[in-house]
Image (cartoon, rainbow, N blue to C red):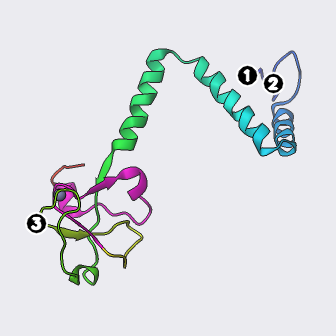
Amino acid sequence: MDVGAGICCNVCMLATEARRRGGVSRAARLTPLERAVAAMRAARGRWSRTTPAERQAIGRRLVEARRRRVPLMAASEWVAQQPPQACDRCGSLDVRPYRAHPLETHKAPLWRCRRHATAPAASYVCLAYRRPVEMSRSGRS
Ligand SMILES: [Zn+2]
């Protein structure tokens, strides 16, 4: 809590900047295990002040982020010359080649049907990711 003029509180009378420097120099002297235990205690302290409703809301947001999927990027034409394979999820033969990851442009493509042409956003989206045009126009996520 900042009382004003960079002073942490009226009890210790330390400036906020001095307290920050002290924390950094103390952390540098701790072992990784001691830092991990301190971080665990800090996290438990933060979670102990939340209500069950807040915990449920945070848990729901984390699950949604884990389950969120994005459309796969089409593989390059050079890679798409390979003989097609069945969809590795359902076995359908109506497939298209997609990049396994946006940065893996010359790796063997993923052969997927339209229904299974998605990937987890958490692992697939990166700076190179471009949402396919036909998927974004139809409003699918
Ligand atoms: Zn499929």
Q: Residues within 10 Å of mark 2 (few under 14, many from 20)?
A: some
What amino acid is at disc 1?
Met
- The quarter of the displayed image where residue 22 is located: top right
Report which residue position mark 3 lands on: 94
Look at 81% across and 24% down and name the residue there: 8
Inter-mark Cα distance, 1 to 2: 6 Å
Circles 1 and 3, Cβ within 8 Å, touching? The answer is no
Q: For the residue with label 1, is its CB less than 8 Å from the closest atom of ligand 1?
A: no
Of badges 2 and 3, nearer the viewer stands 3
Whichever of callouts 1 and 3 sits on the residue coming sooner in the sequence is 1
Q: For the residue with label 3, is its CB less than 8 Å from the closest atom of ligand 1?
A: no
Q: Residues within 10 Å of mark 1 (few under 14, many from 20)?
A: few
Q: Which numbered circle lies on residue 1?
A: 1
Q: Which numbered circle lies on residue 8?
A: 2
Marks counted in the figure total 3
In this rendering, is residue 116 above or below 15? below
Tag 3, which secondary structure? loop
Tag 2, which secondary structure? loop
Whichever of callouts 1 and 2 sits on the residue coming sooner in the sequence is 1
What amino acid is at disc 2?
Cys
* Depth check, front residue: 28 or 18: 28
Please state the extent of the stretch shown in magenta in the rendering: 109-137
- The quarter of the displayed image where residue 115 is located: bottom left
Inter-mark Cα distance, 2 to 3: 65 Å
In this image, 56 relative to 46: left or right? Answer: left
Look at 42% across and 55% down and name the residue there: 123
Give yes or no for residue 116 being in the magenta stretch.
Answer: yes
Give yes or no for residue 130 being in the magenta stretch.
Answer: yes
Circles 1 and 2, Cβ within 8 Å, touching? The answer is yes
Image coords of residue 110 (percent x, y): 28, 68
Image coords of residue 83 (percent x, y): 19, 80
